[in-house]
Amino acid sequence: MSNDIFIVIEHLDGKFADVSFEMVGKAKELASVLGGKAVAIILGSGLPANGFASDTTLFVDDANLAEFNPAAYGKVVEALVKEKSPRLVMFGWTAAGMDLAAWLSARLGKPCVAYAKEIRFESGALIVNSQAYGGKMLAEIAPSGDLAIVAVLAGSFPVEAGQGSTMATQIASPVVLDGLKIKFIESVKPATGDMDITVQTKLVSVGRGIGGRENIELANELASALGAVLTASRPVIDARWLPTSRQVGKSGRKVKPKLYLALGISGAPEHLEGMKSAELIIAINTDKKAPIFNYAHYGATADLFEVAEAMLELL
Amino acid sequence: MAVKFKKTTAIEIEHAVIDGVDISGHWSRMFEQRVIFEYTPELIEKVTDLPDAESFAYCYQCAKCVPVCPVDIVGDYGPRKLYKYAQTGTDLLQSPGLWLCTTCSNCLRVCPKEVNMIKIMPAAREQAILDGNFVPKELQDAFENTAKSGNPLGQPQRKRDAWAQNAGVTVPIIKDLARPVDVLWYVGSYPSYHPRGMDAASAAARIFSALGIDFAILGKEEKDDADTQRLAGEKGLFEMMSEHNIQTFNKYEWKEMVVTGPHELNAFKNEYPKYGFDRPVLHYTTFLARYLDQLKPLLKHEINLKVTYHDPCYLGRHNGEYEAPRKLLQAIPGVELVEMDRNRENGYCCGGGGGGMWMDSYTDKHIKMRLSEKRAMEAASTGVNVLAVACPFEVSRFEDAVKSTGNEHVGVLDILELLDQSMRGKQ
Amino acid sequence: MNIVVAIKHIPSTADDLPIKGNNLDFDSLDFVLNEFDEQSIEQAVLVKEAVGGTVTVIGVDLIGELDGVLHLALAKGADKAIKITANEPGADSHQQAKWLSEAIKGLSPDLIFTGVQASNDIDGQMGPMIAAYLDLPYIGGVSSVEVAGDTATVNKEFAGGVGAKYLVNLPAVIGVQASTKPPRYAPISKVRQMAQTAKIENLEPVGEASAELTFKKMAPPVMTGHAEMLTGSSKEVAAKIVDLLKSKGLV
């Protein structure tokens, strides 16, 4: 058993995810309290692995790990964790991390905390804050035992603290990576043809509060009147009321417009991740406790349709 | 499936002497029960086994229904034929014929055996839906829109009363009034959302207002009656909507309800009572005919038009109102009312009932011309300027039909619009 | 193809969430189907329609109200419904995943679908746990599934619209983000028919697992920043927003 903290690093198209740097920074802080090391674990092939501020970087360089593969990554991480018994294993609560964290927890019989926002040790005891229930609740949780897994919401910690120049130690995969049940075939690039919402200066964005496909037109009219582009949170995209190219959030695009007018968006962490650094956020929602109001600069508890129609008259 | 019809032997007594009199000859088969056994009864039983559909078996192929069936007139149809097709191997639940009936009820009017397609068709369609059989896409969309948006057009609920802003008179919302009213006016989905329906709704508001009627509407609380969806096979949807509507209706105090549409009349008067709603409901023509004496002095402007009136199936045949619409038209100064050959009890169907409103592109493939086109041609042949209607389904159907049949010179107007024109002068 | 969909009944976040002690007050919550499960049920039915087979929907009945959800799934094309009656409204993902795994084991499925996540997955999602307990591969964030023989080709979504195709050997557990086509409308007649006629198989919970988490506190997040709230009628709010945008030169 060690006091080390593992950070499972994530990358896409050769680029490391911000959340990985965030976690490394946090892990360093935690490891120094515990008297352990922050160990960045990179699974990949031929990556520039020396850019982290971790105490140690282990780079499992293997062609089978070139692209994310839950079967391969799971096996390798499980083997490393079993071998080195860290105190804490950190994943991002991301498309990749979500495949691994809960799986590893069930494999090892060790606790896992998802939607993690804050992590600390209080007299040696681990405390994790989890922002669940669509961002409406913050749970303060103490995982039992000597090994815990956390899956961290992106944007929880500063990126800079994790950037550094620790020389990575290349290691061979601790397990044989053949007979994998999942095979990577190819990457799928974002659909072109529609516009790139990340370069727009003004966005009107709709969420579940828009109600139905029949109401999209009103939002579109408002967007046009403002010279803005219409975007949406995930429920609207999953219902196919707007194309995926218009999705803001974790599984969509990250945007930083001058204006983000959020209509009927409650502000689940996955959505906030994609828009919270917009310069001016104005949110309209009927639920005065909607988390979006904690991030918006201006807000109103009002009927989005009435406000949109009234704005159209004024514009 | 158990076979219910047993083969019996026809009786022919060629040589018989009774009381010394030789009466040899052919005995009429009509005196004995005679069951057709050459055909398999399974596909007929598949229909008659459904609740409310047993009368399908009563058909004895007399064919009285065929010449009055509006679909047969533009195609090859009629209840008699459906029975025959079932005898000869067509499963009604999987055949296009399932979706062509408009539940106009003209067959039932002439059927000596009371084979009731108004009950058979909804039952067979519901079973087809439950079995996961083919259902026309547009119809499915209308069901889904009704369930999700509260109206078959898929328009936003919040805009249900938006038309009232342009009515030119105050249209009170019962919730805002917070007091009992004499008349609760159920506007209906097409008058609330369809541009031409909105014209009729606005006209109605002006007429009610001019007559000094103490009325109010439900506004954003109003949802579709869903009776046509029931006839098209989605009984569960109908029940869900009726539960909602009855609850809404009973929230408020009012003396009688006036509806713009005959389908809503049928729903609230004949169907909702089965679910515990039993309050007076009138079609607007019946209601306004009561006010003829007060109305006549308001009809100041002459409308010099030759007008024919199309009887909506669900106002006439289904609910027996033929005279009130005619009285209203005749009250308008300058209107010359002429009748089409098929009128009143034998009125021809516009094709919109029983879900036909939401299946045109499907039914088009199985008929020579739309029923609305046939009717528009009949109207045009009387030499009229205006085809007057009293059902919100009809204005849009007939406006399309007069255009597609080259009869644009015939205007299509709701009686409400004609009354309003006479009241205010042509706008 | 023997397809199983494992669903999760979760507290509704539409209304305020009541708190009791250090956790939610599970006895006074409304429960709804996890929204991602609507997608996973649809995906299962789409696969069945494409390659044949049966769809079994299974879930843990936490508060005795799962039947409605199962009837809806049956109306949408599932063939069989099973509930594990637990009456433990606060059961965590680990425990539910364990019960489900034990029940699913007996079904010998070729393919198991779950929703990719749920808003109450504080201890992680059930999908990967079921995969771990049954020793099957897991892939989540999936937005399309095509089955051919004993493999499935899936599209997994990463951030920024980037995705990747994977070939998955069956049996496997797939966490659905969005079904290939949006969830279908179930005729209300069909849902009501199912409510009257469908037989829901009832299983006892078997097996034990725990999240191993102690809740110290549960509360709405306290934020340092909060929006400046614009008050008044909708028209007044609209006017204030327009003025604000004008003052910042945004319109």
Image (cartoon, grey):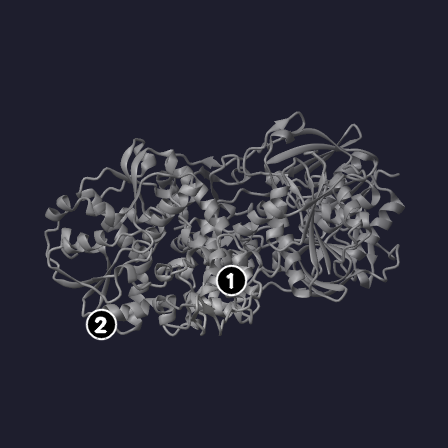
Q: Chain of mark 1?
A: B
- The image quarter in which residue B310 lies: bottom left
Q: Is residue A168 visible?
A: no
- The image quarter in which residue C100 lies: top right
- Along the viewing direction, whichever of C150 and A94 lies nearer the viewer: C150
Residue under label 1: B135
Q: Which circle's residue, 1 or 2, is located before the other in the chain? A: 1
Which quadrant is the C terminus of chain B positioned in? Answer: bottom left
Helix, strand or loop under label 1: loop
Residue displayed at 25% across by 54% down: B322
- Along the viewing direction, whichever of B283 and C108 lies nearer the viewer: B283
**Extreme top residue here?**
C21
Return the x and y of residue A170 as percentages of the image width and height: 85, 56
Return the x and y of residue A25 as percentages of the image width and height: 72, 43
Q: Is residue B398 visible?
A: yes
Residue under label 2: B381
Return the x and y of residue C46 as percentages of the image width and height: 63, 60
Residue under disc 1 on the same chain as residue under disc 2: yes
Work out whether B274 lies above or below A222: above
Crowd rating for badge 1 (residues with CA inside 10 Å; few <14, some 14–19, many 20+)? some
Helix, strand or loop under label 2: helix
Side (left or right) of B141 relative to B262:
right
Q: Disc 1 residue type?
A: Val
The mark closer to the camera, 1 or 2, is 2
Q: Disc 2 residue type?
A: Ser
Q: Chain of mark 2?
A: B
> Which of the labelled discs sits on residue B283, or is there none?
none
